[in-house]
Amino acid sequence: EPEVTQTPSHQVTQMGQEVILRCVPISNHLYFYWYRQILGQKVEFLVSFYNNEISEKSEIFDDQFSVERPDGSNFTLKIRSTKLEDSAMYFCASTAGGDHEKLFFGSGTQLSVL
Amino acid sequence: GESVGLHLPTLSVQEGDNSIINCAYSNSASDYFIWYKQESGKGPQFIIDIRSNMDKRQGQRVTVLLNKTVKHLSLQIAATQPGDSAVYFCAEIFSGGYNKLIFGAGTRLAVHP
């Protein structure tokens, strides 16, 4: 069964450093998302992406965040200058389109900012 | 304001019993209500959804009930199995907000043999 894959599974970085989280969505999907989950809290929407542009973004997704689909398979989330409060599990998700309520999530990247 | 929340943070059940996980929502404009399951170390997994114009929808061993009068959503799991142990999140999509899910806080379901 096709699945969303994310790398790395764990990322440790120093405050102020840039990180890039990588995702390979399911191949025939058209809509891509990043969500995050701070330990013990709810899953929070960050950004949605369709047709090579951002469709919607949350208040969390400020100027320090960016997304890119550099080729036909990868979807990346970049944090330019990480802060302690960016520590969280980051989930990539995708859907084919038409069923926006049914997202396919990856297993996540645990980001720890020290 | 808009919010999706859960009544109980942890639910413990015996294997074979039925489980009921509850969720309250505040936004009457939501089009879809959805249940996701998150197992340890994994991302959320879609279980079942219900459109706002429906009251009940059944899947395999799961049933979702929507009570719009009191803005309440529930997930019923029949004959709960150890593999059902996970955190369950309710989520919603607002009218016109088809690009994002709004998740609730989550309920942990612990199934005991």
Image (cartoon, coloured by chain):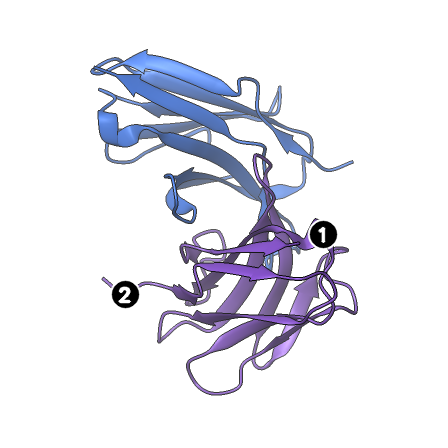
Are both tags, 1 and 2, on one chain? Answer: yes
Q: Chain of mark 1?
A: A
Left or right: A56 as drawn, with respect to A108 = right
For badge 1, the amino acid type reads Leu
**Quadrant where the N terminus of chain A is found in the figure:** bottom left
Q: Is residue B92 above or below residue B71?
A: below
Disc number placed over residue A2 in the picture, else none: 2
Mark 2 belongs to which amino acid?
Answer: Pro
Chain letter, purple: A
When asked about the image quadrant of residue B58, the answer is: top left
Which of the chains bears the disc numbered 2?
A
Residue at the (36%, 75%) spot, across then down: A28
Chain letter for blue, please. B
Label 2 secondary element: loop
Is residue B53 at all visible to an observer of this figure? no
Tell me the residue that label 1 is attached to. A84
Point 40% across, 18% down: residue: B20
Marked residue nearer the N-terminal end (1 or 2): 2
Against A66, residue A42 (above or below) is: above
